[in-house]
Amino acid sequence: MVKRPGTPKTNTSGSSGTETGRQEVCPICHGAGYVRLDVLPDHPDFGKAIPCQCKLREIEQRRLQMLQESSNLGLLSRMTFDTFVPDGHGLNSETQSNLRRAYEQAWSYAQAPRGWLILKGGYGCGKTHLAAAIANYQVEQGRPVLFVVVPDLLDHLRAAFGPGSPSSFDERFELVRKAPMLILDDLGAHSGTSWAQEKLYQILNYRYNAQLPTIITSNCELEELDPRLRSRIAELGWSSVLHIVASDYRGSSVAQHSELSSLSLHQEQTLDSFTMRENDASLTAEQRANLKRSLAIARNYARAPDGWLILTGGYGCGKTHLAAAIANERVNAGYAAIFVVVPDLLDHLRAAFAPGSITGFDRRFDEIRRSPLLVMDDLGTHSATPWAQEKLFQIFDYRYNARLATVITMTRDAELDPRLKTRFTDALRCQICEITAPSYRGSGSQVRSASLDQTRSRPGRPARGNRSLGISE
């Protein structure tokens, strides 16, 4: 007759475990780790050493540890569904809903991995955390998974060609290509060499044909990827593409975390603190009306940013105040915004090339280019080097095509790249607001008065208050 599972027939070899500092000994096997079941001689387990319950737990822990090590999760083992904050901190309701949907979809995928899950969004939005959470959940369930950062993966494959490599290129390549579940983190951050693109395509194409579960995170738009990669990633019915709009789910907004943003220096500049200068006797009635209209335009834009708003006028007229006030209004409502002075931005980008720079140029550039709301202060005061002109055009061109909300301040006579002028004079995307009041600081000459009612718009399009900036169409 078989005894209760795990009950030893005899075992006296284990230590008592009564010595101080010794680990408690299992009361079933007394430290031996194995037991013999009390069964009849004709039973297949008769005389066999069966792992004790404590040994089974040890074996399971060792197996999980091996899975974790082979998964390449490392420090990411702390990124689980339990440690993810699905509602973020200080986010607006729309962003919270988007983040929670991402959390729920990632959790659903972890329960039954099928097809490909594409998590895309800006830096710090939580996509890597969710991908790692899926991986950690798979490991907990005893399922193998491989988590790799794409630039590191390519370096790992290149290193296999070295004479001292412990494994061949083919071995490493096959390990990645045939992983039961593969997570590729930061696709698009790699160098776009022909070799790198070819290897990535071979990996994704194999997994696509073999229908192996795959998770990809990226801060790139799919249109920016190699067409062959995009054809596999964007396959309808097989891939689920989830765009996470939270700029940083760990905090209220990019404005409070980005080193690029100087909005914290303008916290006192709000729409309510913008002065109408009622006691300034030097202002004409038209200039007073202009200030009132400018504030109304800024208030409407802050309520629902759409397209570009260009604030122009003389020095000290209040255009920077209104631009900062718009950004503060959005941040206080839980949205993301970056406020940056153009010459400072260019300095930040140049500094990213320095050997000791913590943040690379690509990340700096993408952070400013993709910000949901970007305020560019003092355009036209930067050094007009070809490099500076090209970087600014790339930023503005991307935001123009992506229809991202942008506020620009500049003097009326600012020298602009001709390519930018074509963007600024598009009345379908840009609203130009000229502040005609002179400097409220009492310094600087009065700029030419002009009514905001003089507008430029395209046929069939309602006038939006655009004025010429000294730009001829």
Image: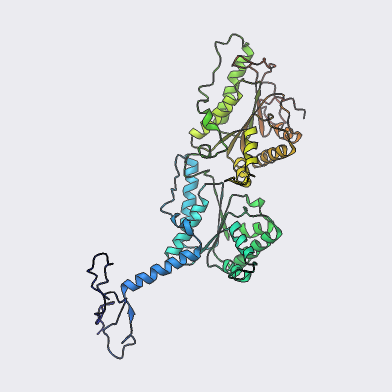
* Residue 14 visible in the shown view: yes
Q: Nearer the viewer, residue 140 or 425?
A: 140
Q: If the image is split into quadrants, where does the C terminus sit?
A: top right
Q: Give percent across and percent down for residue 29.
A: 27, 76
Q: If the image is split into quadrants, where does the N terminus sit?
A: bottom left
Q: Residue 167 appears in which quarter of the rendering?
A: bottom right
Residue at position x 24%, y 70% in the image: 17
Q: Give percent across and percent down for residue 39.
A: 27, 86
Q: Give percent across and percent down for residue 356.
A: 59, 46
Q: Residue furthest bottom?
A: 42
Q: Give percent across and percent down for residue 280.
A: 57, 11
* Residue 303 visible in the shown view: no
Q: Nearer the viewer, residue 469 or 60?
A: 60
User: Up-down: is 441 above or below 135?
Assistant: above
Q: Residue 228 appears in which quarter of the rendering?
A: bottom right
Residue at position x 53%, y 37% in the image: 255
Residue at position x 70%, y 37% in the image: 388
Image check: 42 left or right of 452? left
Residue at position x 64%, y 69% in the image: 163
